[in-house]
Image: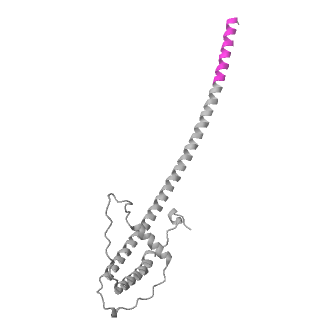
Amino acid sequence: MSIIGLVMNLLLAALLFAALGMGWRLNGRLKALRDSHEGFAVAVRELNTAATRAEQGLADLRAATDEAVDLLADRIAKGRTIAARLGRLLDDAATLPAAAPSLARPPPAPPAVDMVAERRLGALLAAAREARPARPDRFEAPPRREPPPKRDPLREMAAAAAARRLAAMAEDDLFEDEPLTLDVVRGASR
């Protein structure tokens, strides 16, 4: 073996060791890339699961909101119906012919006031009213004050009776449904 052959063999051995080192480093980098790819795939699966849960939550919330809107719309419609009945009863009481004072009966004793029902009815009627602007767009002169009308005891008694009948109907019609609770809105069942 000559020196040139020996140098060529050593050079070839050095190149093989360099290729072996480069292959080793490349293998480490490929392994790290595969691990990061698997971690990315796990993160994508978790994100997909979270998105699915969020969509389901939104659907549940939308259903609960629709149910609450339907329930409130039904109660507002009942409130408007009762308000219309009250208006008709008051109109009927106002159109009664003036009777002789000798025919007037003493008014019956006022019924006990149910404060909870009165507050509920007041809140529902306030919510049913249309929104009015806080300030007028232009200046308007204050309305003229007219002298108060003469008192008619028969009409006052008829109006009081109509109010009592309306209060009784309001309790029967308006609050026959169960009150809306937060559990119903969320869709939870007990």
Q: Position of residue 35 (x, y in %)?
A: 61, 37
In the image: residue 27, left or right of residue 162: right
- Above or below residue 62? Residue 144 is below
Residue 36: image quadrant is top right
Q: Quadrant of the C terminus?
A: bottom right
Q: Quadrant of the N terminus?
A: top right
**Residue at x 35%, y 87% (from the top left corner):** 154
Q: Position of residue 118 (x, y in %)?
A: 46, 75
Which of 39 and 92 lies nearest the eye of the viewer?
A: 92
The main secondary structure of the magenta stretch is: helix
- Above or below residue 101? Residue 116 is above
Q: Is residue 2 visible?
A: no
Which of 120 and 109 lies nearest the eye of the viewer?
A: 109
Residue 151: image quadrant is bottom left
Which of 41 and 70 lies nearest the eye of the viewer?
A: 70
Residue stretch in magenta: 3-22
**Residue at x 30%, y 85% (from the top left corner):** 96
Q: Is residue 32 visible?
A: yes
